Image: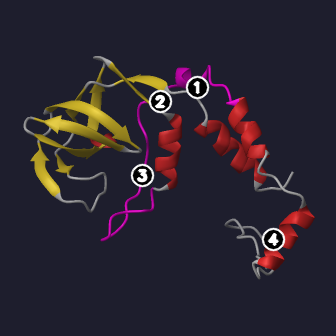
């Protein structure tokens, strides 16, 4: 198996995993923060939120949480919140993975970075199982080397040698 195939298989398994239910419903602001119009650090600030302010949780996207703060609906970095156990909302590992893959993409004016995702526990991962149908579908996209070379020739694609990036301290 090629070295790059393993990460692709892991990603496929995560994307096809069933949804996990997490407690969300209400959250408390742990430190003063800004309520953003979109889930990006450089998005428009709708209002300032004070420490210990209670919010209603609407949804999650990567490390951002959509909340309702009195009359305003917006986004807050998840690390600025403490979640209360009242009610459940489910989210998909697929959505989390896809959002994570797009983390460097910001708005037109910049980018955003994620430092952590809260809410997953070891129990969340105990009963995960791969989606065999999706895995088999992914394998059906495999082609033989001569077929790939023929396609590349038809599209005027050329072989390229790329050097691997060495880890820090590696010779």
Q: Is residue 55 visible?
A: yes
- Quick check: 104 above or below 162? above
Disc sitting over residue 125 in the figure:
1
Quadrant for residue 89, please give it: top left
Residue span colored magenta: 103-131
- Quick check: 163 above or below 48? below
Does the segment drawn in magenta span residue 26?
A: no
Dot 2 alpha-carbon crowd within 10 angstroms: few under 14, some 14 to 19, many 20 or more: few
Q: Which residue is mark 4?
A: 151
Does the segment drawn in magenta span residue 118?
A: yes
Q: Nearer the viewer, residue 95 or 6?
A: 95
User: What residue appears at the point 17 percent right and 36 percent down from the top-left corner?
Assistant: 68
Q: Quadrant of the C terminus?
A: bottom right
User: In the drawing, does residue 93 fall left or right of residue 48?
Assistant: right
Q: Earlier in the sequence, mark 4 or mark 3?
A: 3
Disc sitting over residue 120 in the figure:
2
Dot 3 alpha-carbon crowd within 10 angstroms: few under 14, some 14 to 19, many 20 or more: some
User: What residue appears at the point 88 percent right and 64 percent down from the top-left corner?
Assistant: 147
Proximity of marks 1 and 2: CB atoms separated by less than 8 Å:
yes
User: In the drawing, does residue 129 fall left or right of residue 75?
Assistant: right
Q: Which residue is mark 3?
A: 114
Q: Is residue 159 visible?
A: no
Query: Element under label 2?
Result: loop
Q: Nearer the viewer, mark 4 or mark 2?
A: 4
Q: Earlier in the sequence, mark 1 or mark 3?
A: 3
User: What residue appears at the point 38 percent right and 45 percent down from the top-left corner?
Assistant: 63
Q: Earlier in the sequence, mark 1 or mark 2?
A: 2
Give the total number of marks visible in the rendering: 4
Q: Nearer the viewer, mark 4 or mark 3?
A: 4
């Amino acid at each position: 198996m090629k070295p790059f195939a393993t990460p692709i298989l892991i990603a496929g398994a995560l994307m096809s995993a069933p949804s996990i239910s997490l407690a969300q419903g209400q959250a408390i602001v742990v430190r003063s923060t800004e309520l953003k119009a979109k889930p990006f650090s450089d998005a428009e600030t709708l209002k300032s939120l004070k420490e210990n302010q209670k919010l209603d949780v609407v949804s999650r996207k990567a490390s951002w949480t959509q909340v309702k703060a009195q009359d305003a609906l917006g986004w807050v970095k998840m690390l600025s919140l403490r979640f209360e156990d009242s009610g459940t909302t489910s989210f998909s590992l697929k959505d989390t993975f896809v959002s994570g893959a797009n983390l460097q993409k910001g708005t037109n004016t910049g980018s955003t970075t994620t430092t952590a995702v809260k809410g997953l526990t070891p129990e969340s991962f105990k009963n995960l199982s791969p989606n065999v149908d999706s895995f088999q579908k992914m394998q059906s996209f495999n082609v033989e080397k001569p077929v790939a070379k023929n396609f590349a020739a038809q599209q005027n694609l050329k072989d390229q040698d790329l050097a691997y990036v060495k880890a820090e301290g590696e010779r």
